Amino acid sequence: MNRRFRLASSNDFKRVRQNGKAHAHPLVVLHAAPSGLPSTRLAVSAGRSLGSAVQRNRAKRRLREAARPHLPSIPPGWDLILTARAPISNAAWPEIQEAVASLLRRARLIPDDHAKS
């Protein structure tokens, strides 16, 4: 994913977490808030409860990659935060892909027919 489409500032993180809508899954939590910008930005986070830095970084890489195919179909103007939960460390790749797709569908950011791609 191109770095210019990443959500980076702590003020943006706070705004999305406080004003956005949260959708939870056992593997990941999605926070989504409208931004009014001409593009959609994505941030991925993983807390220390996941384990070592290696485990946290692996979880973030997997979440970024699971979200990447859906980004073109998300309407512009959204800021998204995907937060990894502890069970993601033991989850298979298809489970992570389905978790991200499910959350994006629940947030109504992708159509239902886009989920199986």
Image: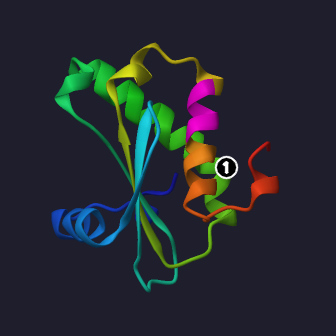
**63 drawn magenta:** no
**96 drawn magenta:** yes
- Percent coordinates x, y for residue 29 in the rendering: 40, 44
For the magenta stretch, what is the residue range? 95-99
Frontmost residue, 74 versus 21: 21
- In the picture as drawn, the residue positioned furthest to the top comes out as 90
Question: Residue 37's quadrant in the figure?
Answer: bottom left
Q: Which residue is drawn at 44% across and 31% down?
A: 26
Frontmost residue, 108 versus 66: 108
Task: Specify whether 13 is left or right of 1.
Answer: left
- Percent coordinates x, y for residue 10 in the rendering: 17, 62
Tell me which colouring the rendered structure shows.
rainbow
Quadrant the C terminus occupies: top right
Frontmost residue, 48 versus 19: 19
- Percent coordinates x, y for residue 4 in the rendering: 42, 65
Frontmost residue, 15 versus 1: 15
Q: Mark 1, residues whose alpha carbon is within 10 Å: few (<14), some, or many (≥20)?
A: some
Which residue bears the numbered disc 1?
Answer: 69
Local secondary structure at mark 1: helix
Task: Specify whether 89 is left or right of 46.
Answer: right
Question: Residue type at mark 1?
Answer: Pro
